[in-house]
Amino acid sequence: MKVLITGGAGYIGSVTARRLADSGYDVLIVDNLSLGHRESTGTLKFECVDLDDRKTVSRVCGDYKPDAAIHFAARSLVGESMTDPLSYLGGNVAASLNLFRSLVENGCRNIVFSSSAAVYGIPGSVPIDENAPVRPINPYGSSKWICEQLLGQFSSSGLLNFVSLRYFNAAGADIGNDLGEDHEPETHLIPRVVLAALGKYPSVKIFGTDYPTGDGTCVRDYIHVNDLAGAHIAALDYLLERGGSTILNLGNGDGFSVREIISLVKEVSGVSFSVSEEDKRPGDPPVLIASNSRAEFEIGWKPQLGIREIVRSAWEWHSMHPDGYSG
Ligand SMILES: NC(=O)c1ccc[n+]([C@@H]2O[C@H](COP(=O)([O-])OP(=O)(O)OC[C@H]3O[C@@H](n4cnc5c(N)ncnc54)[C@H](O)[C@@H]3O)[C@@H](O)[C@H]2O)c1
């Protein structure tokens, strides 16, 4: 079974690619290394490809002839998408369309797509299930929704089947394979707090302390990157055995506030660091928690790792790599 993995030099893609290879899949990673790290791909097959370049994407699909593809590659900074919407509504969407078209033209009919909880915008209620209204509030979320709609149209025209996975907050590290989160800039809470504990940032900023939550700070659902990798294998099995298309939330189904994460990092690291309280950021929903029951029902996936394993593995990996992959 041959699986093409776009964005496989990135955080979630590298962990998933390694898991697939270890499970006996033939894997080819394609990535333009704009945000990813060649080191994270190890000895797996790799081609430096920009998905914007349709001719090359088509050539790679024709040469490799994958049975399935997992499409992680994207820019994914919400703030950047507000200041540079074209890179998202143009770039991410056009790159995805190049890929979908090249796959279909070369006989590949199975796609797993990295979508996001950002498609839900500010949800009316939690936990959020897949029937919740889709109303993204930034170009990043919109680009994911447009790609899902493209996949839906390809699927209803009989061209392919897809599983779109709407991740909540990916976090943690794959310690066994020495793979972790190394983004520049890093905007995600857990690595930012861990890096503050390591002295890489002078303090941790809390944006908003009067939300209608237990301690006034935002609550998010964190899902371990190894659990996400497992969900991609289950999604591939679904495509190859059942041959339908579906959209699934991937989260733990639990919420943790910003203050709870900070306390846990302090406890796990044994390090104290300063915390500053800042104004709310526009567009930050108070609470985002996934309902993951459809994923369990449809692909038999259930997360195994909780918030302690997430924080402990992130702390361990960043302690070993305080400067990320380049360190
Ligand atoms: N990390 C999260 O918490 C999270 C949550 C929801 C959704 N997602 C989605 O999951 C996917 C992976 O996230 P991640 O955190 O691993 O991101 P990442 O930035 O670590 O990895 C993305 C990879 O894609 C590559 N890439 C980007 N544009 C490309 C292009 N045009 N051609 C070829 N390669 C390209 C980058 O070089 C990078 O290696 C993304 O699509 C993201 O939007 C992530």
Image (cartoon, grey):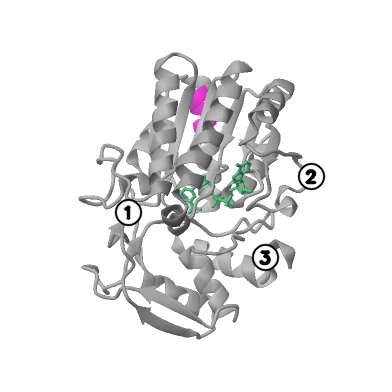
At 60% across and 23% down in the image, what residue appears? 102
Q: Position of residue 16 (x, y in %)?
A: 60, 43
**Judging from the image, what secondary structure is the residue with disc 1 in?**
loop
Q: Position of residue 119 (x, y in %)?
A: 35, 44
The magenta segment is 235-239
Total tally of numbered discs in the picture: 3
Tell me whether the residue at label 2 lies in contact with that at label 3, contact meaning CB atoms closer than 8 angstroms.
no
Q: What number is the disc on residue 43? A: 2
At 43% across and 75% down in the image, what residue appears? 262
**Judging from the image, what secondary structure is the residue with disc 3 in?**
helix
Placement of the C terminus among the 4 image quadrants: bottom right
At 44% across and 34% down in the image, what residue appears? 147
For the residues labelled 2 and 1, the Cα–Cα distance comes to 36 Å
Magenta part mainly helix, strand or loop? Answer: helix
Q: Residues within 10 Å of mark 3 (few under 14, many from 20)?
A: some
Sequence-earlier tag: 3 or 1: 1
**Judging from the image, what secondary structure is the residue with disc 2 in?**
loop
2 or 3: mark nearer the eye: 3
Decide: is 161 above or below 179: above
> Does 139 appear in magenta?
no
- Which residue is at the front of the view, 260 or 141? 141
- Whether residue 199 appears in this view of the structure is yes
Placement of the N terminus among the 4 image quadrants: top right
Q: What number is the disc on residue 324? A: 3
**In the image, is the residue at mark 2 within 8 Å of ligand 1 by its beta carbon?**
no
Q: Position of residue 57 (x, y in %)?
A: 66, 29
- As drawn, which residue projects farthest toward the top? 158
Question: What's the amino acid at mark 2?
Answer: Thr
Residue that carries the numbered disc 1 in the rendered image: 289
